[in-house]
Amino acid sequence: MFQFKEKGRRVKNMNEVENQPLTWFWYPYIPFGKVTLVHGRECCGKSIFASRLMAACTNKKSMEDMKEIAPGNVLYFSGDDDLSELIKPRLMEAGADLSRVYTINDMLPITLGDDSIGQIIESFGIRMVIVDPIQEYLEYDIYQDTPDMVYPIIYKLAQLAKESGCAMILMAYSDGLGGERGNVWKNEFAEKISSVLCLERQGAESKEICLRHEKCILAPEGKVRMFRLDDLDMGF
């Protein structure tokens, strides 16, 4: 006859819980130690925006209303763009310190058994990780399969962010603000995605990009920001 072994529950008094102050890369849009998701339609400027974030992290090229932080190293996963033809020129134009940017230019999926990301973060002192786009590094199509299949990977990335203290930023293709696919990122991952941002082009031919803060579980959502694709000038 089978016997089930009882599992004990550990009760912790709140006095035993250590305080862990929350720090921000860009308040209230991008926290350190958490996962931020930036989504939008194709050609809405996600990769250029990623370059701007890397410049801000590596070389004090601050966004509007961003407090100055010490320069840090960045790990950039790029599954779409060529390093020499697109990524490096964008970083140079944005003013990034190239010596602080480390890249992985492949489409090998992020898996539960893959410990390489954590090792790279530790070895290179990474302060920010950007995965662009996250869909290229998933074994499942989050829009065709159920989000439950992707949740363990998002959980793994959230744990890496928490343990290392880095800002984990995931770029994603979607159908834009209020779309069914965009809402997947906002609604399906509970606290594992702490902040959700949506980029929108202000017209098919427009170079003006709108950044909308759709969700934040750590602070009130930030105001709408506007910037241009050609000069990357962040403003109100």
Image (tube, helix red, strand yellow):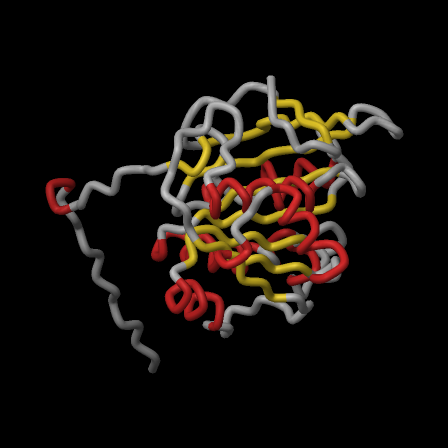
* Residue 9 placement, left or right of 111: left
Specify the quadrant of the image occupied by residue 39.
Answer: top right
Q: Nearer the viewer, residue 206 or 221?
A: 206
Residue at left offset 57%, top offset 57%:
76
Residue at left offset 49%, top offset 54%:
74
Residue 184 higher or lower than 97, as above or below: above
Residue 215 higher or lower than 140, as above or below: above
Quadrant of the rendering where the N terminus is positioned: bottom left
Residue at left offset 51%, top offset 73%:
114
Residue at left offset 39%, top offset 33%:
68
Q: Residue furthest right?
A: 205
Q: Nearer the viewer, residue 124 or 91?
A: 91
* Residue 151 placement, left or right of 44: left
How many labels sit on residues? 0
Q: Nearer the viewer, residue 171 or 215?
A: 171
**Position of residue 100 measured from the top left corner of the image (x, y, whole percent):** 48, 56
